[in-house]
Amino acid sequence: MTTVNDQGVLSPYPKRLRRAPAALGVLAVETLTIILASFLAGISWHYAAYRDIGPLDLFLRDGVSVAILFLIVSSRAPGYPLSILREEAPGPGLAASWAVAFSAHLGIGFLAKSLDEVSRGSTLLFLPLGFVALAWLRTVLARTLGNQDFGGRVLVVGSAAQIARFGADDRAQRYSCVSLPLADADRCDTPVGRLRLDERIASGVAMVRTFDCDRVLILVPWEERAVMDACIQAFLDTPATIHVATPPGFETFARAARYDAEPLPNLRVAGAPAGPVVHATKRVIDFVLSGLALFLLAPLLTAIALAIRLDSPGPALFVQTRHGFNQKSFRILKFRTMTALEDGPTVIQATRDDPRVTRLGRFLRRYNLDELPQLVNVLKGEMSLVGPRPHAVAHDLEYQRQIARYARRHNVKPGITGWAQVHGLRGRTETVASMERRVAFDLYYIENHSIVLDLRILLMTLSPRAFLNAY
């Protein structure tokens, strides 16, 4: 990390980075991906339905239209397009941007009376195909280019110790950083200290302009309000975005926001995962889809139940107490896949090649068929189609003592599938660290809960990754 001292800049910082070409490259690749998805959807549908490749010029028109609208909507996200290179997996922002762009495309087509020129089948196929293609593209780009210096230039301001801690964080390695260390003498409580501080900050402002920094990260403690205010006021005169580090422990609150409520403006650090409209919509979707699925899958459910009774002695269903929304207990339903029926203070997790798993049970667990009876729990309102997977009560009590914010998993209804499961985080948790990783994905879902994210997870449940570690 480049630093500044009284003699000037050490280790001259490269003034020309690859940010602009990289950004244009990402925009070009995403645009091309959308256009290709339009062609693929149109040609596939027309060939399957009419045995011809269809109107290629109209596929090009629709692809370009959606691509332009998508780029316009996505540009509202901070740091786009290079910000996508720092994400391990596409977040709900992609789904929302794609849905808005596609809806705008349909609205424009309706007003222009051009929707009838293209088959509805190809348009409906373009919607999921384009989203899947973009999600795959962003995942590949993040994994192959995420460690490059495309993250932008950051000026880090703070004490030498604070800057050193920041530089040691793995996440900081994705950025090209320069630092402006403030000494203990750089304070505002004396005229000499204030003059020294102003001179030091002025050199930081010069660095922002000379090195074309995108952001300024101020690590000054909140109790040193005068120093922080001096930094903010000075850097406001630069085009860089200003970030102030949160107090220790504040990282626990992922969605803190200013809330100007009477009688006093305040900082909301946590709130309900979603509003009443989202909850009502989610319940309607759960009720309709679970009822429809139970009706359509009734023959399969009956066949599985009979096969279980014939395969091994015992009931067809396994019933166990789990914690649901707000830690209210309910009885979860599963097809029995083991010879053990544990439901008490000690529950042993299934392991790979576990001798307690029956022959048929191994097949059912491999393809998640043992979870189908939980559609009844969803219909009753005890569970949702999407949400954190409920654990045995014994495991809840154990991990609640070891993992911070574990209990926050119960702030939404548990689900048959979830954000952690579609990323392969299922099966036995042999260490606390493995459960912490699963909980981190559950908390991400809770903090970013939306209907669009739920629909995305339902689609991802059909991917091979969702069946990893199934035994």
Image (cartoon, helix red, strand yellow):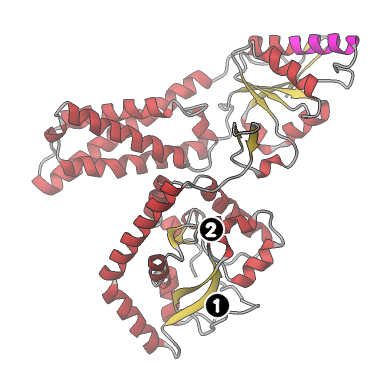
Q: Which mark is residue 108?
A: none
**Mark nearer the viewer, 2 or 1:** 2
Whole-percent x and y of residue 269?
A: 64, 41
Residue 299 position, x and y percent, is 26, 76
Q: Is residue 200 magenta?
A: yes
- Identify the main secondary structure in magenta: helix
Residue sitting farthest toward the front? 263
Residue 444, how many percent across, how many down? 55, 47
Q: Which amino acid lies under the numbered mark 2 shown in the image of this protein? A: Leu
**Relative to 66, is 464 above or below?**
below
Residue beneath disc 1 = 354
Name the residue that disc number 2 marks. Answer: 425
In the figure, residue 62 lies in which quadrant? top left
Q: Is residue 48 visible?
A: yes
Q: Is residue 435 above or below residue 159?
A: below
What residue is at 33 percent from the left and 27 percent from the top? 69
Taking depth in this image into account, of 245 and 5 the one nearest to the observer is 245
**Residue 267 locus on image (x, y percent):** 64, 35
Magenta residues (range): 191-202
